[in-house]
Image (cartoon, rainbow, N blue to C red):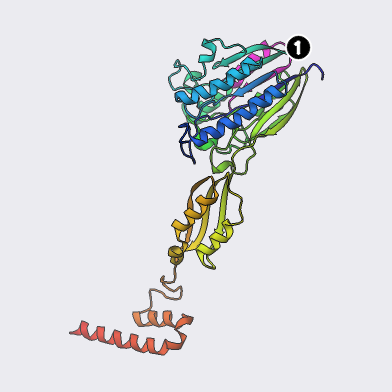
Amino acid sequence: MDKSVRVIHTGDLHIGVQNYGRLESDTGIHTRLRDFLNTFDYLVEYAIDNDVDAVLICGDIFKNREPNTTQQREFAKRIKKLSDTGINVYIIVGNHDVHNAPHKATSVEIYDVVDLPNVHVRRKPSIDILDTKHGPIQVIALPYVSPSVINAEGTTIEELSLDMRKKLCDIVDNLAKKAYTDLPTVLMSHYSVIGAVPGSERSIMLGREITLPLSCFARDEFDYVALGHIHKHQVMGEEPPVVYCGSIDRVDFNEEEDKKGFVIVELGRGYADYEFVELPTRPFKTIYVDTTEGDPFQLVEDAITPLQLEDAIVKLKVKINSNQLPDLREGDVYRLLRDKAFYVAGIEKDIISDKSHLRHPGITERMDIEEAVTEYIDKKEEYEAIKDDLLRLNSKLLARLREEDIV
């Protein structure tokens, strides 16, 4: 264990996510961009303070294929900081990094062009040996490859998907056979493994989804398999460990309950000890209130008042009767939330319609008007005291209508 190499496994940084926030007046930076940069800063400082040998980033560096210059600058600052301290940074591209045009450069390839020390970017399947403070490690890269590049064969979507799956697994097989057998070895990839729980990535994916079997990655040639693309941290297998690090921060409310972080790995030939390190991220909080049995605003106020929401992005979900909507006082609710929370994402109303005006189930099409009205009035408890008067008035009204029809 003394000769083990220590690496950080991360990915899905999604720098550039700008939902549920606002621009900072003094810097012009969006508060959600600041959130993601802060969590990445924590990772960078952890790597430096804990004598980490390499940071492995498994794709989706930016939210979009063409990040703006501010996003690129902020990412570059942090990569340079790692490089300056002698930490290797190995980046593979993800589906959010790849253009539809196969030969168009990705936003992170510039680091290969400027030859920043200790920084490596791969957009094609590759094998690299990284020299670290504690010895060499072998990294096998399977970045995301656009389906148009794979040249899948088939006449149906299912046939094309199966052929793409086979071709990608063949690539992994060929890389594994070419790898050195005496070095600690990590496989990095940016694909979905069959059975993985997707989190929110399914809602923001770009392009066609390809899923690969666990057997594609669970091979004796690899000591650890570092996966990106799925936002929820999870372990898919143990021999060797096949692990999704998850995204470093929450993208939306689908990830409200997910812990965010990275994986620290102690790596040697034939073993890998790993641990999930949780990051201090901004919380998302959904507040549920049922107001159908009381005063809507008062019930909402009572639910919100004791909550600690200063740093949270919040959303309110209210179950409410349709005839109570004016009593919710939505403007006052927004003001109450804004006074307590970092950001208010909205108020969603589950409106229970008033169906008292609908036809009574005892009424049938075979009844004439007088029979139907009599049935309706007879079954309404609130009409009990005046039922006879209502029925008498109904008979008079119908008689008058019949007289008018005759005339």
What span is colored magenta in the figure? 167-191
Which residue appears at 58% of the width and 46% of the height? 310
Q: Residue furthest left?
A: 407
Return the residue nearer the eye: 26 or 275.
Answer: 26
Please report the residue visible at 59 percent of the width from the left and 40 percent of the height from the top: 282
Magenta segment: does it hold 168? yes
Position of 302 compared to 264: left or right? Answer: left
Q: Residue at x 55, y 63 (%)?
A: 299
| Residue 212 visible in the current orientation | no
Quarter holding the N terminus?
top right
Q: Which residue reaches farthest right?
A: 2
Q: Is residue 389 left or right of residue 156?
A: left
Residue bearing the label numbered 1: 182
Q: Amino acid at mark 1?
A: Asp
| 169 on left or right of 335 | right
Q: Where is 62 relative to 130, above or below? A: below
Q: Residue at x 59, y 43 (%)?
A: 283
Q: Is residue 261 left or right of residue 390?
A: right
The image shows residue 119 at horizontal and vertical percentages of 60, 14
Q: Is residue 49 magenta?
A: no
Figure quadrant of the C terminus: bottom left
Image coords of residue 64 (percent x, y): 47, 28
Residue 370 visible in the shown view = yes
Query: Please, what secondary structure does the residue beneath circle 1 have?
Result: loop
Question: Of 278 and 23, which appears nearest the observer?
Answer: 23
Question: Quadrant of residue 88 in the image?
Answer: top right
Which x, y percent locates residue 273? 76, 26
